[in-house]
Amino acid sequence: MSLIFLKQPATNYLADNPIVFCLQSDSPNHVAVEIAALAYRGIYTPTTNGANYELTVDIADVIKSSMPEVNPIYNGTLTGSVVFSYLDVQVTFLQNSDLLTYNGKVYNGGISKLFQRYLIEKGKEIFAYKLLNPQKQFLLTTRTSGRHITVRERELCSFYFIASNENYGIETGDGHTGLDFTLQNLTVGNIHTFDLGYIRKLYGEWLDFFKLTVNGLVIFDIRVIPSAPVPDIYVIEFRNSYGVPERIEVSGKKTAKPEFSDDNAFNRFDPDIYDFIEQNERLAIREVIDAQIGYKTPDEFLFARDMLQSEKRYLITPSGSRYEVRVKSENFTHELHPVAPGSIPIEIIFVDTETQFSPPPDESKQGFPNPTGGDFNNDFNNDFNNN
């Protein structure tokens, strides 16, 4: 008996889940495992199993360290394309003169162990079940696996998906003709995006219901709902479990809680008084915001969990400024079956530690507003306000 596969991954795989090979041989000799594109070579020793020898190899850690990041796409068009969507992988196993080869595509992200067990029971894998299934909701989103997606206006950003050899389209739910769109210039196997904000910008923000079609059939829909009716909404953009950007609102109360470094006072001799005086160097400060994430539905609570687990997050302020942050929650609790929306406390921690201060940049033009308040310049007076 020569070297054979007992188990090997599917052609497409996610880097954050195990990528396991099980091999069997009649020889106890070492097996050389190579991934040429990553310049990786490992030597593995089979273990005895009855009259044969078996070997189990998980290459996920090797692959994950070389995966390309999927960055946000803001190109002002309906569709976009991720330049490096996946890693083409060829893995070879060599024992004596026996050679086995595996070829596949590895994408960023992963699914939960709970979902893995569900798919194993069904005899399926995530790409055939969802991500490359034209009859399912196939987006790389963790908002829901269902066919009805709800997103708040301020959370709206590009949706990501892996293109199959199908015809994709978007229909608006207003009943009017002429507002149906075809997703064009797609490459099979690549990650592409579509931006509903682009359609709303062109044709009006009253468009709030969109149907996604594959080969002319409606597969799922996306409804855009108003953001929370409060001023100064912040948004957290994060890398979800599929490895692509998504957004969630922070619409509750927010309180600044900057953290100062420990006092670094030291004694310095002052020759004027011929004695020591106490001084300090500039203190470091880290910006911290205590916030309530705002009222969320049960699905949004689960979506918030993914944000809290993320390794990459950005805070987007009402003015559009963008800061890399960490986010944590010391008391993430919510009812399993709530009858009303609830909120959770979070702590937003800026990744930068500052020793200097600069006032916010001023981009105003000549003829700026009156510094005493209001939106009027000196050509207006109190007679106007009293009328």
Image (cartoon, helix red, strand yellow):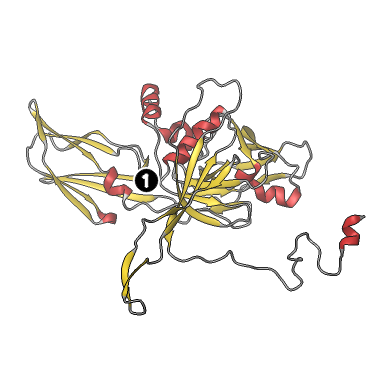
Residue sitting nearer the eye, 370 or 206: 370
Q: Secondary structure at mark 1?
A: strand
Q: Quadrant of the C terminus?
A: bottom right
Name the residue tied to disc 1: 106
The three-letter amino acid code for the residue at tag 1 is: Val
Residue 118 screen position, x and y as percent? 40, 24
**Image check: 275 left or right of 250?**
left
Evaluate whether residue 196 shows in this view. yes
Left or right? Give the position of 112 relative to 221: left
Residue 185 seen in render: no
Pick the front one: 344 or 265: 265
Left or right of 176? Residue 135 is left
Locate residue 340: give its quadrant: top right
x, y (%) of residue 354?
Answer: 44, 62
Q: Quadrant of residue 125?
A: top left
In the image, is residue 240 above or below residue 75?
A: above
